[in-house]
Image (tube, grey):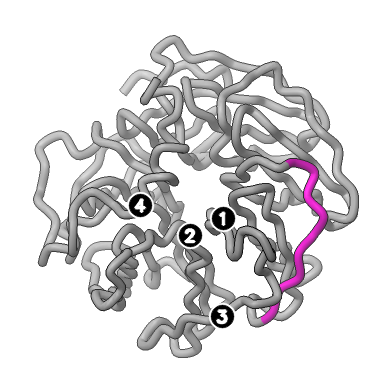
Amino acid sequence: MAKLLIKLSLFLCLLGTSGVSAEQSVIAAKAEQSLLIDIAQLSGDKLVAVGERGHILLSNDNGESWQQVVAPTESTLTAVTFIDDLTGFAVGHQQVILKTIDGGETWALQYQNKEDVIFPALMDVWFRDGGWGVAVGAYGLYLHTKDGGQSWEQMPLAELEDPDFGLPHFYSMGYDGKNNRLFMAGELGFIAVSEDFGETWSRLESPYEGSFFHVAVSNSGSLHLMGLRGHLFRSEDQGETWDAIKTNSQASINSMIELGGSQLMYLGVDGVLLFSNDDGKTVRKIQRQDRNGLMAGVLTGVNSLVVVGEKGVNRIGLDGQNKEQ
């Protein structure tokens, strides 16, 4: 059961498992086989993956080989993003925020709120440019920076509070570059939009009362919401109305990958992938035999993906099968 609900368990493990962050991560012999939660793609065949115990792994050959680098934390890292090929950020449990300025080769601890006795986890991070950025997480945790992460400030979001439940857990952000709109999704069917890069927010009417683990905007401009028990929704009008997409699966969906043209791939727990060739209007379920949970991935070539998840890194084709190393 833990395998089937790996993403949900991560989100509900809001207090983390390692206490206050240690000085640095431990180099592990099989780090590429450990739980990895997010992956970023840079130019020149370079990939950066992050996960449990502060693991940060680099590949310079599109995922054929990996090298772990030291991180200034042992906290689980939940998300990684890059502004350019040199400057990137990673966030995670214990409100840890890390920054790199050399493409992930070295990392510095930028933020950690040790005065917060609850230590809610950060779940996602997004930057508009080299200055303005936002990090979001559990219990309505919302941090922003105006100076490229040198300082972070917690923002109250009274406009998003529910009178009965308060602020939800925030799990994901997705940016629509064509319309300059930032979306945020979370628990209890939460979905909101910002038209000023995250300075203010407005709730959108939700098509579902359960948790959304990921929100994304496709190249065509359609908006995609995915989450608990295989629920997938698509909007062509910026979230004003939604279409429920039949997935034939109850596996929670964790992320979406652009494959080019109108092709998309959704990744889920229990080794489930959902392939679409019509921008998410319909999907075809692919079941991997290992049934390991998949968290995130990137397209690295024609019919070639690198995915990370419960058992580390895998190179797979669009048929969901592993590629030979």
First in residue order: circle 2 vs circle 4: 4
First in residue order: circle 1 vs circle 3: 3
* Whole-number angstrom distance, CA of label 4 to CA of label 3: 32 Å
User: Label 4 is placed on what type of residue?
Assistant: Val
User: Label 3 is placed on what type of residue?
Assistant: Pro
- Residue sitting at 39 percent across and 68 percent down? 88
Q: Kindly report which numbered mark, 1 or 4, lies closer to the viewer in this rendering.
A: 1
| Picture disc at residue 172 | 1
Circle 3 is placed at which residue position? 156
Q: What element carries label 4?
A: strand
- Magenta stretch, overall SS: loop
User: Label 1 is placed on what type of residue?
Assistant: Ser
* Whole-number angstrom distance, CA of label 1 to CA of label 3: 18 Å
Q: Is residue 210 magenta?
A: no
* Whole-number angstrom distance, CA of label 1 to CA of label 4: 19 Å
- Residue sitting at 40 percent across and 28 percent down? 315
First in residue order: circle 2 vs circle 3: 2
Q: Residues within 10 Å of mark 3 (few under 14, many from 20)?
A: few
Quadrant occupied by the C terminus: top left
Q: Give the range drawn in magenta.
A: 200-208
Q: Kindly report which numbered mark, 2 or 4, lies closer to the viewer in this rendering.
A: 2
